[in-house]
Image: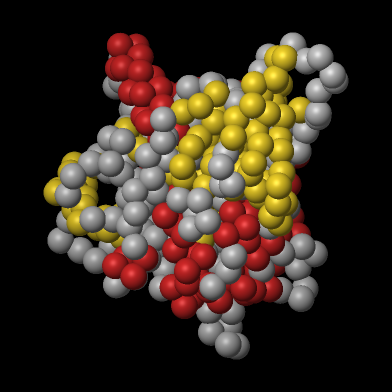
Amino acid sequence: MSFTKFTNCQLCDQGIIYYDGELYVDNSTGRIASRPEKGAKIEVVDLEGNILAPGFIDIQNNGIFGLNFSSLNGNSSEEDVEGFRNHYRDAMAKYLATGVTAICPTVTSNFPEVYEKVLPVYKVSRSKVQTDSLGAHCEGPFINVQKKGCHPPETFTDAKGGYRDITKVYGENNLSEYVAIVTAAPEIEGVLDVIAVLKEKNITVSIGHTTAGYETGLQAIENGATMVTHLYNAMPQPHHRDVGVVGLITSPIAKDAPYFGLITDGVHVDPSMATIAYRSRPDKCIVVTDAMHLIGLPDGTYKWDNQYITKTGPRLYLKGTKTLAGAATTLPQCMRNLMAWANISLPEAIKTVTNNPAKSIGVEKRKGFLNVDCDADLVVLDKKGFVKNVYKLGKPIKTSDENQPSKLMAAL
């Protein structure tokens, strides 16, 4: 057996820095290992005093490097699907260079024939050369038209037929095999009743694109919902006597506060509001990109289904409107933004892109931590939080982490 030993580094996990640390990887399994017995073959990697942390996890991402995760449809041929898979593999390899070692590819509200084609592509993976899929995030179509954002309302539906209606949209096998998260609005008929069924199938139910009030949100949590999708966006804004869904994260009544996604790109949420949310429940905060497929592409106007999106730097809007259509900011930059806005330490910020997302979807025993037997998906960071190196299952990956200063991105 052979091992890689990372030394002369600071290990960062669970919000703590361990100085003068070392970490072993079993090269045959690609997993973090205990100290090998004497006589084992060991390759030593000197990290020159930098920080070694778990690879980043992005649980809400709509597309990358020109690939829209929802772009197949009922008319897509086998050749189209194969081309899509090839593009997917290429895009996931490129995204790995940013330090994101796993994602939940997000499929926005769509018709059943789209889910039939795209969901199998997002089967849970374990690769040495590309960002892994942890299962799809199905954002809609069981959402409220009044909070539709850029989702196409013609795809929206309800679940008054119960779990049967859910499987009609996603496909029963697709749902059980390829889906990690379902975002739904609890006020939509039938949604409250199917939350428990989805939870039994180890699918995380997240509240989002909703007009629900606080009481309905509490009922959703009581039924098994454990997350809120992109907090503040596509939901009623909190008032001190009418807190709405946002109030769930600090509820003294809820049996357990939900995890919540927070888009800290400086476009979706004002830095002061992001700071309030983080400081309220840092242990439940998950930094997400909500990235669109235009990430990595030049500025301009791009066709998206039957709509057009204008990209100006990291900002994406439906053409001719002020309606946000996602973002084009990397996860490491979003993490650094939160660190600057909330004046928190790098170890605290790292938790929001590693430990917290892993726990939110139940993969903490294999991803998002530096524990023995976890996958050796690792990032090497400098003290400012820039990704210097990436290791996938212990293998080095060429790295790319560009700076997009938060002070330039905070203008709304």
Q: Position of residue 198 (x, y in %)?
A: 68, 41
Residue 83 seen in this snapshot? yes
Q: Position of residue 6 (x, y in %)?
A: 65, 33
The reply, left or right, for residue 133 in relation to residue 79 is: right
Residue 230 seen in this snapshot? no
Q: Nearer the viewer, residue 302 or 185?
A: 302
Q: Position of residue 282 (x, y in %)?
A: 65, 65
Q: For residue 189, which quarter of the picture?
A: bottom right
Q: Nearer the viewer, residue 267 or 347?
A: 347
Q: Nearer the viewer, residue 299 or 124?
A: 299
- Quarter of the image containing the N terminus? top right
> Residue placed at 38% from the left, 45% from the top?
401
- Residue that extends furthest to the right in the rendered view of this protein: 37
Count how many numbered circles sit on residues in the image.
Answer: 0
As drawn, 14 above or below 166: below
> Residue placed at 51% from the left, 65% from the top?
339
- Quarter of the image containing the C terminus? bottom left
Q: Nearer the viewer, residue 363 or 169?
A: 363
The reply, left or right, for residue 366 in relation to residue 84 is: right
